[in-house]
Image (cartoon, rainbow, N blue to C red):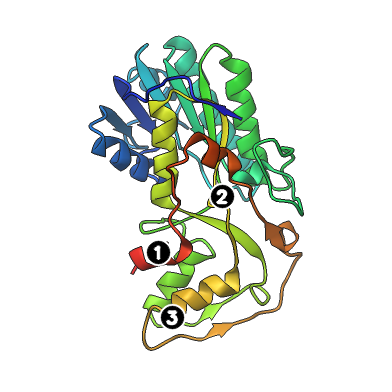
Amino acid sequence: MLTLNQLPPTNPPRVVVMGAGGFVGRATCARLAADAVNVVALTRKEVDLLVPDAAPKLAAHLTPETTLIVTSALAPVKNTAMLLDNLRMMQAVVAAVKSTPVAHLLYISSDAVYADSRAPLTEASPAEPGSLHGVMHLAREVMLKCELPAIPLAIVRPTLIFGPGDPHNGYGPNRFMRLAQAGQDITLFGEGEEQRDHIFITDVAEIIRRCVRHRATGVVNAVSGTVTTFRSVAEQAAARFEPRVKILGSPRTGPMPHDGYRAFDAALLRQLFPDFQPVSLAAGLDRMR
């Protein structure tokens, strides 16, 4: 559960975004800057979390008044080597904050930390990841909680993020829109029958912004609360371009991820931020044209 510790919401004196060159980091910097927040955007160029002197380099950008947002990750995690690199990156963050404590820390995690469920997931659902990617994010969350117990910590767990500027070309809205725009057929895994929640990138940034301004602590899922099949996503993407591309099924080479169903109950978001209205899938796809 997430607790809002600052009412009314107020801009912090200074925000450092670690991973500002990534999908979520860029959007977060832009959203905070629109509120005239003093944002320090750090990319790998300024602070590479995998080099030996990463901790002192990051610490040099921190102050006792700083809100630190950590979005940096090597993702998706495909093997043990990537997992260990990600843990080393968080080790550098922990060391930096230990040497120069900050006022508030936000970690952008992932819904991959949750166990599969036939019921909609909530922030109270068991964190029992079934993938190395989920293991990485959960281990990082635990590292922050255990190593920095005195630092106010908020953890944001987004589901599948879509929107312009995605660098991963991930399966789903991002890839389907690019294929349809290029006039290339969309090939689904199986028949695309899996049902998943998708959240627009600006909504993720908005949730992070609200956590920052409320100096929130605890956990919140960044979700829309609506599930859609991948076939429906592909059909909606194809319908936005002419000539309309074909949507093709393909044989599966492994089990269906999450048993084909990954839904979320967005009740906590509605309770905390009743004025927050997530961008619909259709509206988000329109913004990607």
Q: Which mark is residue 267?
A: none
Classify 161 as above or below 105. Answer: below
The image shows residue 194 at horizontal and vertical percentages of: 67, 66
- Looking at the rendered structure, the secondary structure element under dot 2 is loop
Q: Which residue is mark 2?
A: 159
Q: Is residue 23 visible?
A: no
The image shows residue 120 at horizontal and vertical percentages of: 69, 50
Q: Residue furthest left?
A: 36
- Asked if disc 1 and disc 2 are in contact, CB closer than 8 Å, the reply is no
Write down the quadrant of residue 14 in the picture: top left
Write down the quadrant of residue 149 in the picture: top right
Q: Which residue is mark 1?
A: 283
Residue at 54%, 37% in the rendered image: 271
Decide which of 178, 239 is in the foreground and name it: 239
- Asked if disc 2 and disc 3 are in contact, CB closer than 8 Å, the reply is no
Q: Residues within 10 Å of mark 3 (few under 14, many from 20)?
A: some
Query: How far, Cα to Cα, is label 2 from label 3?
Result: 24 Å
Residue type highlighted by circle 2:
Thr
Q: Residues within 10 Å of mark 1 (few under 14, many from 20)?
A: few
Query: How far, Cα to Cα, is label 1 from label 2?
Result: 18 Å
Classify 111 as above or below 176. Answer: above
